[in-house]
Amino acid sequence: MYQVNGMCPCPDFAHAPSHLCAHRLASCFARRLQRQQAGPAATPDAPLAVPPAPALPEAPASCNVRVQVAGHEVQWTLHDTDEARLAQRLTALLALEPVATATPTPEEEGGEGWCAVHRVRMKHQQNKRGGWWSHKTPDGQWYKGK
């Protein structure tokens, strides 16, 4: 919880009229609401009692996978209550992205765009300094054929 005791470290504190930034105003509103709910016996200086948020339940089955979506590599997390259903959902997700085959065509083998070390197709990358071929290894590192 964000606590404010007369001063606030936010950038708006110095510029707000009477130093009433959003944090100080929210604190005042919360105290006033708490006093109204507690009734007339509540004191103005009583500390703000906010119950802790309940913890989110942990999913019995979950899976993290890195996939390409619209040309962008993303980390996708799947949660479910059943491992079999999670496996079906994972299979459907992985089917969205075609996997490069590890068997080269005769034109590819030994040619540009094919990694003979890992036996996969490479992507052509380019920046201001020029272009090169590379691919990601199973451990997530980029391999440039060096």
Image: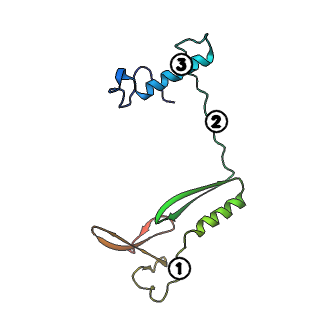
Q: Position of residue 39 (x, y in %)?
A: 62, 14
Q: Is label 1 in a helix, a strand or a loop?
A: loop
Q: Amino acid at mark 1?
A: Ala
Please give the name of the residue rendered at 72% of the width and 56% of the height, measured from the top-left corner.
Answer: 82
Calculate the distance from the C-alpha at mark 2 to the C-alpha at mark 3: 24 Å
Residues at circles 1 and 2 in contact by the CB criterion of under 8 Å? no
Q: Amino acid at mark 3?
A: Arg
Binning the other alpha carbons within 10 Å of mark 1 as few (below 14), some (14 to 19) or many (20 upward) gives few
Residue identifier under label 1: 102
Q: Position of residue 41 (x, y in %)?
A: 61, 10
Q: Nearer the viewer, mark 1 or mark 2?
A: 2
Circle number at residue 32: 3
Q: Is residue 137 above or below residue 83?
A: below
Binning the other alpha carbons within 10 Å of mark 3 as few (below 14), some (14 to 19) or many (20 upward) gives some
Residue identifier under label 2: 54
Binning the other alpha carbons within 10 Å of mark 2 as few (below 14), some (14 to 19) or many (20 upward) gives few
